[in-house]
Image (tube, rainbow, N blue to C red):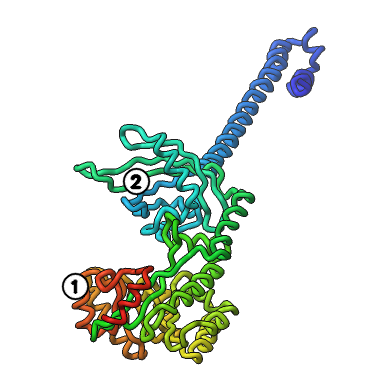
Amino acid sequence: MDTAWLGFVRLPALLRGEPWLGLAGQEGWISELIAMLLVPAEVYLASLFFARQYREKLGWWRTDRLMDKVLSEGMSWRWATDASSRFTYCGPECLQMVGYEPSELIGHHFSRVIDPEDLAGVLQDRNRRTDTTGAWTGVRTIYRHRLGTRVMVDVSAKACTDMKGQYLGLEGVTRSFQPGTIDDRGLAETRRRVAAVIEERRLSTAFQPVRSLSSGKVIGAEALTRFPGSPVSPDAHFSHAESLGLGVELEIAALESALEASRALPRHLYMAVNLSPDACLDPRLPAVLGHAPLPGERIVVEITERHAVEEYAPLSEALAALRRCGIRVAVDDAGAGFASMRHILELSPDFIKLDRDVIAGIDADPARQALGKAMVGFGAGLGAALIAEGIETAQELAVVTDMGMHAAQGYLLGRPSLSRDDWAGWALE
């Protein structure tokens, strides 16, 4: 209004006339009057224009904020599982939602991202919400982030079947409402449950036989941890403990369980136990192995590929101390990733265990055969014996035997067993 008044008074002067005088007697008073009337109109229109611009910018800002909110709080992660609840597809959103790359989830059980108790609740709620098409929506639960945080989610999915109606798995969408939200009480309770498993030794040891390919006799047994009464895989337990900072604690507990169980193994067999590089560096390890009920010559430490090793010197020193006690070293899952090959080059193991991914179908795959032959030559050059993992067919067994591999294990040669009678029977084979 002040601007309009200023224009009303000053504009006629700019037109070389006194405003009130022009109105009284000058001939140009009409043009001056029009000018005085137009200025307030122009100012008014300008104010409308700028007000509209402000509202539009405000609207754009609100829309932008809303989109950010939708993207951050309503992110959707698409996934699929097979009939055994293992991931067959993971959208890239899983990295932001639960902290895993898609490649780290595919092939793993769904329990890697959800606690067993929460998974049980999902299954119950799903049964109540499933419609006639096999689809269900709106199941609320909590996922476990890789770092241990708890994420509130809404899960929807549908069952997939083949032409005969046989169940093939699930296709689903998980929507995160509060990504990364930490539920301190829930996290503390989860940590308490894992700690209880460790402290109360609610785990057991199964052994799987390792057979010589030249004689067919059992020469060793790999210790495999089991969690009685748990619906999830042992790998999920170790991953869960690791996400809570209790991974090494669980490994030490599993090692102690395996050493105690090894008392029942035939005396001519060695016992192989899996340990991560972090567990090998734990200061408690020498004492635990030092009190083992069997001599060091009968113990093989298999280095797993759970973590990349940045500095090999400390790990090599730790393993050298164990080797001085007669303990031998194996690199597990060779061929499954780059880290395992680095382990071989840096640690000079006594055994190289070829991963099941290399062995599966080796009888019909020239590429796998070429890799197997190369690894036999590579191992010979290092003075390391090759062990083929995951032998499931007679054809696979024949091929790895012809290649000159030292030993093998797999379902064809003997399944993991908790039975001491089975262990004792290996002495007779």
Q: Which residue is mark 1?
A: 394
User: Residue drawn at (43%, 40%), measured in percent from left and top?
Assistant: 124
> Can residue 308 be seen in the rendering of this structure?
no
Q: Is residue 11 left or right of residue 374?
A: right
- Hey, which quadrant is residue 191 in on the image? bottom right
Secondary structure beneath disc 2?
A: strand
Disc marking residue 170: 2
> From the viewer's perspective, is residue 114 above or below residue 347?
above
Label 1 crowd bin: few (<14), some (14–19), many (20+), radius 10 Å: few
**Is residue 240 or residue 285 the one in the foreground?**
285
Could you tell me residue 276's position as x and y percent?
49, 73
User: Residue drawn at (62%, 54%), measured in percent from left and top?
Assistant: 188
- Hey, which quadrant is residue 408 in on the image? bottom left
Q: Is residue 197 left or right of residue 365?
A: right
> Can residue 38 be seen in the rendering of this structure?
yes
Could you tell me residue 98's position as x and y percent?
50, 53
Amino acid carrying mark 2 in the image:
Leu
Say whether disc 2 or disc 1 marks the residue closer to the N-terminus: 2
Label 2 crowd bin: few (<14), some (14–19), many (20+), radius 10 Å: many
Which quadrant would the N terminus be assigned to in this image? top right
User: Residue drawn at (36%, 54%), measured in percent from left and top?
Assistant: 86
| Distance Cα–Cα, label 2 vs label 1 | 33 Å
**Is residue 289 or residue 7 the one in the foreground?**
289
Amino acid carrying mark 1 in the image:
Ala
